């Protein structure tokens, strides 16, 4: 159900034409895959350390280096090298469709059928974004996918979001950003794009949304977006 409404949408609000999504924590619950990969590394290094899958969620939005070094703990040898090894293993790992949050696949299909352009803006490396979307059957929904890449600063810097906007015809005022963390909120606010917050993701504990709309159900969020489109049969 809708969790909290913080900025009402008035009748004078422009219709939404383009929805920009974060990936991890918004569409895909990638924590289990990350924990599995890092647990394999721990075993191979002879460590008896076990990663708490619940506690690991707090690391998912902190960036790759912090996640790998934090979850490997004393078994971390070189954070940059260990991150490269983690990402290499990730490329070989199938992302199960079951890692999609409830309602994501059907909700994205409804948004596309409603005439909306959908994009991805993620700090996850580009090649891994494309792989995860393909593995989970979501790739065809997205007109633009921009992930982390050389020469572009990660969110909350605007580089990745600007790369998305530069590849579509819709102005920022016709866009909406859907994410699960304070990083997503910050980049949307910096670009003056309305924000929808998914409460089930990887936001820092204690972080409170100050402006935007929060949802704990993807399908409810999709219905709210469709209600603001001028062409959708669902409006």
Image (spheres, grey):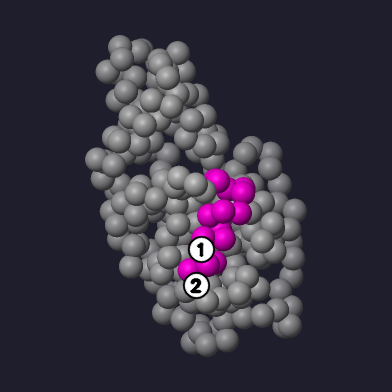
In the image, residue 161 lies in the stretch drawn in magenta: yes
Is there CB contact under 8 Å for labels 1 and 2?
A: yes
The number of callouts visible is 2
Give me the C-alpha separation between circle 1 and circle 2.
Answer: 7 Å
Can residue 222 be seen at all in this image of the molecule? no
| 92 vs 48, nearest the viewer | 92
Query: Does 91 sit left or right of 3 as displayed?
Result: left
In the image, residue 66 lies in the stretch drawn in magenta: no
Q: Which residue has dot 1 on it?
A: 164
Q: Give the range drawn in magenta.
A: 153-167
Residue at x 44% of width, y 47% of height: 149
Residue at x 67% of width, y 51% of height: 186
Quadrant where the image shows the C terminus:
bottom right
Q: Residues within 10 Å of mark 2 (few under 14, many from 20)?
A: some
Can residue 85 be seen at all in this image of the molecule? yes
Helix, strand or loop for disc 2? loop
Q: Which residue has dot 2 on it?
A: 168
């Amino acid at each position: 159900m809708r969790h909290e409404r913080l900025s009402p949408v008035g009748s004078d609000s422009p219709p939404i034409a383009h929805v920009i999504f974060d990936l991890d924590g918004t569409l895909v619950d990638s924590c289990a895959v990350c924990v599995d990969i890092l647990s394999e590394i721990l075993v191979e290094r002879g460590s008896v350390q076990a990663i708490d899958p619940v506690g690991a969620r707090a690391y998912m939005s902190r960036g790759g280096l912090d996640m790998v070094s934090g979850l490997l703990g004393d078994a971390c040898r070189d954070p940059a090298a260990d991150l490269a090894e983690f990402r290499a293993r990730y490329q070989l790992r199938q992302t199960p469709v079951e890692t999609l949050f409830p309602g994501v696949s059907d909700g994205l299909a409804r948004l596309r059928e409603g005439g909306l352009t959908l994009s991805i803006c993620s700090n996850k490396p580009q090649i891994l974004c494309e792989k995860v979307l393909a593995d989970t059957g979501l790739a065809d929904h997205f007109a633009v996918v921009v992930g982390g890449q050389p020469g572009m600063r990660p969110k909350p810097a605007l580089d990745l979001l600007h790369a998305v906007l530069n590849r579509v015809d819709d102005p920022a005022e016709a866009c909406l950003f859907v994410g699960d963390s304070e990083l997503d909120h910050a980049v949307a606010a910096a670009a003056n794009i309305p924000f929808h917050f998914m409460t089930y993701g990887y936001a820092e504990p204690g972080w409170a949304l100050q402006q935007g709309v929060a949802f704990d159900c993807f399908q409810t969020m999709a219905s709210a977006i469709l209600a603001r489109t001028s062409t959708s049969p669902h409006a």
